[in-house]
Image (cartoon, helix red, strand yellow):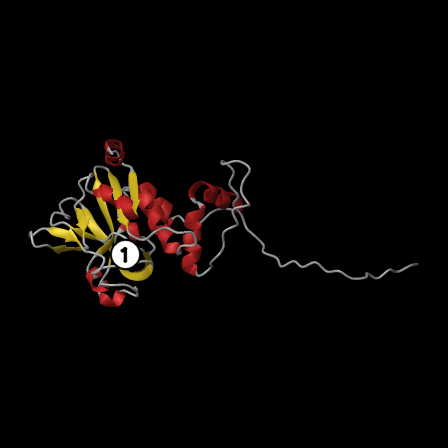
Amino acid sequence: MPQIRKFVESGGSVVTIGSSTSMAETLGIPVTNYMTEDGSDRKEHPLPQDKFYVPGSLLRIAVDTTNPLAYGMPDKVDVFFDSSPVFKLGPDAALKHTSAVGCLPGRKCSTALGVGQQYLDGGTAIAEASVGEGKWSCWVPKLLSGAAAWNFKFLFNGLYLGSAENADLNSRAAAPDTLQAVTETTWKDDEELFSSMRERLFTAAVGDVLDTMGFLHQFLPPGIAPLRQDMVVAGRAMPVLEADCFGRGDRRSD
């Protein structure tokens, strides 16, 4: 754990999912278990299963789309909840640069089958925090094969967020390179266009843009891959519909 803390403080990104979110306490992040009740000893205790039990269900959460972790996300998403942890932020969360990104905003958000769904009201499903120069994020949904596309947006946003820096796009003097990269939309010829694509773009970014435009399922299957990791293909594609035709051809003789 000390090595992980050093990694984050040096500018790394740590994304925790499900039970691995328990490392937050070790990193000094002010998030605790939300699913508790006060006992007779005036201490908080986890809710017993006869009061709260929600296995294998879909929950709808509200997303703070102003947070960089939620870049490209809608304001509401459905998540797969399977006895997952739910968090509450401590009173010193703001001082420790910790914020909620996805919340369970009330009873109407839940389509869960189980016992005690009302205890989920107001809980935090996704949170992020600054630790030194890096970022830590946690989310309760399990990342399953065939998961919704938004899962991967949260995942990759979290991975890139640690080393990201704030850029003032309104000031050319503050960040001229960033502003130029954002506003530069012209090119001289195809060679310059494709060269820029190879250097600046990557598959996930292009896929997100296409998804937003409504063009889904645009990725090549995993079996089609470059021969080497340094190979990149960028250019225009011409989709064609092909069908094999079988029949007796005409034979003409002179």
> Is residue 164 visible to us here?
no
Q: Is residue 5 left or right of residue 155?
A: left
**3 versus 125 height, above or below:** above
Residue 249: percent from left, percent from top: 81, 60
For residue 60, which quarter of the picture? Answer: bottom left
User: Farthest bottom residue?
Assistant: 108
Residue 72 on image: x %, y %:
34, 55
Using the rendered view, name the quadrant where residue 254 is placed.
bottom right
Residue at x-position 39% and y-position 48%: 184
Compared with residue 158, is residue 7 higher up or lower down, i.e. above or below? above
Extreme-right residue of the structure: 254
* Residue 204 on image: x %, y %: 42, 48
State left or right for residue 233 relative to residue 155. Answer: right
Which of the two residues, 247 or 141, is positioned nearer the viewer here?
Answer: 141
Q: Residue at x 62, y 59 (%)?
A: 241
Q: Where in the figure is residue 69, as x and y percent of width and height?
A: 29, 50
- Residue identifier under label 1: 65
Name the residue rendered at 33%, 46% in the picture.
179
Report the number of discs.
Answer: 1
Instruction: Please state which of residues 208 and 9 is positioned toward the viewer in this rendering.
Output: 9
Q: Residue at x 28, y 52 (%)?
A: 140
In the foreground, 167 or 123: 123
Element marked by disc 1: loop
Residue 52 visible, this orientation: yes
Lateral position of residue 244 relative to residue 86, left or right: right
Point out the image quarter for the N terminus.
top left
Amino acid on which the number 1 mark rests in the picture: Thr
Relative to residue 77, is residue 104 drawn left or right?
left
Question: Seen from this angle, which residue lies furthest front?
Answer: 50
Give the crowd class for mark 1: few <14, some 14-19, many >=20 residues within 10 Å. some
Q: Quadrant of residue 159?
A: top left
